[in-house]
Every structure is written in structure tokens, then in C-alpha cells.
Image (cartoon, rainbow, N blue to C red):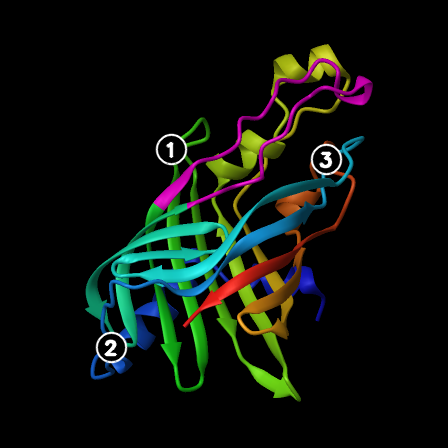
């Protein structure tokens, strides 16, 4: 079975159904109590994002890095959350995401196209830190131009080899037609101006695999590395604007670990 067929077997209803089945099972679990002291990692990182748009290269940025909690506030790399009521091993959270999906039509190959504004995903989610691994569930709506929706479910385990910690990850990301068509569609007017064929992108579900590594640098400093690959659904990768079937993202961070 190819990644495409595997991805298309899932739907937003399937993602929500799995969450609906799982969360009642966690109803009796006990979440970690809220503590108004910083626990986790805070530092800086170099982030890399591989562009899927033709003629656009990969981007690297030096930005703050955080994976920490402070009372009801939580920062998890690119997601900022505010915890509300307890749900299972975690909390129902109001969440916002720092997206890098936007792009500018600033190359000769993209002449005649309009810039795509970077999405501003806002919504709800939960982080379930269970005895069997961590589960991230999020549902977003783009508050910027597309007004499209995003759903994601990610599971991460942990195992140690000596002093190093490894975090394999597997997940699914769903985006609806509004979201995809804004970023990867080509309107009739753009087709006439650019020479690209007109294209309407539909909804997509993409499998994601990742691996994170924590390397102690001498207490309290930690080196954290992560690489994730997403396999693009045919409704996205068939766009004439795209040059890739997969997208890789990652970062290398050095942080101070608060305990």
C-alpha cells in the first residue's frame, strides 16, 4: 500500500472519531497539577523548512525555542496553548500555531501569481502525557486569508540509549479544501497571467513520521534535534505549483532545562 492510498483511507471524521473514542478512556486519568513555576526547556534554535513550491528553496531561521509549562501556559515548539479544564492526562487547551505554510511569488518562475499569506491557525487541542507515550490532538481554523481548517493527531514515544533520549513520532495531518486551495490552487486569472494550468486543490490527509533526540550537554543544558517528513496527498501534490511529493522540517536547539 502506498503512502497516498494510506493517507486517503483517513478523513477528518476518522480523526475526530478516534479522539472521541480515546478521550472517554482517559476520563479517570489524573493530569499533572498546575504549577506556577517554569518546567521544561527554553533556549534558541535553528529551524529548517523545505519549500514544496517550485523555484523556492529551503528556509532556515534562528528563533527562540521552547517546550515548557508555566501554570496554565504551555509552549510546545510551534504551538502556544492555554490550559482550561482537565481532560484525561492533560487539559483542554486554547491553542495557536506558528505556521510557515505561506509563500511569496518573488521568483521569475512564479511571475503572475499572488503571494500566499502565512496562515494564523487558532483553535483547541490537548496534550496527553500518558504512561504509554504522548498524544497531541489539535483542531485549528486559519484566522488569516484562507479561513480553512486543520486537524492533526500525533503520537510520540520515548526510549533511552545511555544518556540520550529518542522520541519516534507518527501522525496524521488533515487540511480542508479551503486551506489547500488558497495555498496551492491556481485561479483562472492567475493561470492567464502566469501560464500555469488552473487548479482547484481539494482536502487532504497526510501521514507524518518524525524523530526527536535529546542529548545532555551538562546540566542544565540540553541539545535537542528533530526531523519530520510529511507525505503530501495527491490533492496537494498534483498542483502545478508544487515540485515535491514530500516535505521535510526540522530544528536543532540548545536550551536550558528547568526542573
Which residue carries the number 3 mark? 53
The kind of secondary structure element at disc 2 is helix
Is residue 30 left or right of 247 when viewed as pictured? left
26 over 249 or under it: above or below: below
**Which residue sits furthest bottom?**
162
Q: Position of residue 186 (x, y in %)?
A: 64, 25
Q: Position of residue 218 (x, y in %)?
A: 61, 74
Q: Tell me the residue at 53%/26% (across/down).
A: 117
194 over 96 or under it: above or below: above
Indicate which disc, 2 or 1, sits on the residue closer to the N terminus. Answer: 2
The kind of secondary structure element at disc 1 is loop
The kind of secondary structure element at disc 3 is loop
Q: Residue 234 or 153: which is nearer the viewer?
A: 153
Pointer 2 with pointer 3, Cβ within 8 A: no
The answer to whether residue 38 is magenta is no
The answer to whether residue 102 is magenta is yes
182 over 234 or under it: above or below: above
Real-space CA distance between mark 2 and mark 1, rounded to the nearest whole angstrom: 30 Å
Q: Position of residue 26 (x, y in %)?
A: 27, 80
Q: Position of residue 252 (x, y in %)?
A: 67, 57
Q: Label 3: how many residues lie within 10 Å, few (<14), some (14-19) or many (20+)?
A: many
Real-space CA distance between mark 1 and mark 3, rounded to the nearest whole angstrom: 22 Å
Q: Tell me where the magenta segment starts and ends, as one range.
A: 97-122
Which residue carries the number 1 mark? 143
Residue 24 is labelled as 2
Q: Tell me the residue at 68%/45% (across/down).
A: 49
Q: Quadrant of residue 76?
A: bottom left
Amino acid at each position: 500500500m502506498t503512502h497516498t492510498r494510506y493517507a486517503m483511507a483517513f478523513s477528518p471524521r476518522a480523526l475526530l472519531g478516534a479522539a472521541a473514542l480515546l478521550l472517554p478512556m482517559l476520563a479517570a486519568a489524573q493530569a499533572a497539577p498546575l504549577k506556577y513555576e517554569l518546567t521544561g526547556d527554553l533556549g534558541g534554535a535553528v529551524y529548517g523548512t523545505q519549500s514544496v513550491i517550485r523555484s523556492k528553496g529551503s528556509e532556515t531561521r534562528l528563533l527562540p525555542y521552547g517546550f515548557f509549562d508555566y501554570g496554565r501556559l504551555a509552549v510546545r515548539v510551534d504551538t502556544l496553548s492555554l490550559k482550561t479544564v482537565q481532560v484525561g492526562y492533560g487539559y483542554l487547551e486554547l491553542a495557536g500555531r506558528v505556521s510557515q505554510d505561506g509563500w511569496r511569488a518573488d521568483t521569475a518562475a512564479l511571475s503572475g501569481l499572488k503571494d500566499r499569506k502565512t496562515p494564523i491557525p487558532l483553535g483547541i487541542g490537548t496534550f496527553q502525557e500518558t504512561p504509554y507515550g504522548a498524544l497531541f490532538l489539535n483542531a485549528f481554523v486559519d484566522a488569516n486569508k484562507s479561513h480553512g481548517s486543520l486537524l492533526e493527531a500525533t503520537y510520540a514515544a520515548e526510549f533511552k540509549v545511555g544518556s540520550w533520549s529518542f522520541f519516534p513520532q507518527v501522525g496524521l495531518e488533515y487540511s480542508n479544501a479551503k486551506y489547500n486551495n488558497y495555498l496551492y490552487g491556481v485561479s483562472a486569472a492567475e493561470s492567464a497571467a502566469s501560464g500555469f494550468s488552473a487548479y482547484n486543490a481539494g482536502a487532504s490527509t497526510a501521514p507524518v513520521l518524525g524523530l526527536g533526540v535529546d542529548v545532555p550537554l551538562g546540566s542544565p543544558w540540553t541539545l535537542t534535534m528533530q526531523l519530520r517528513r510529511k507525505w503530501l496527498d495527491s490533492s496537494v501534490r498534483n498542483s502545478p505549483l508544487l515540485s515535491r511529493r514530500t516535505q521535510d522540517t526540522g530544528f536543532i536547539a540548545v536550551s536550558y532545562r528547568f526542573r
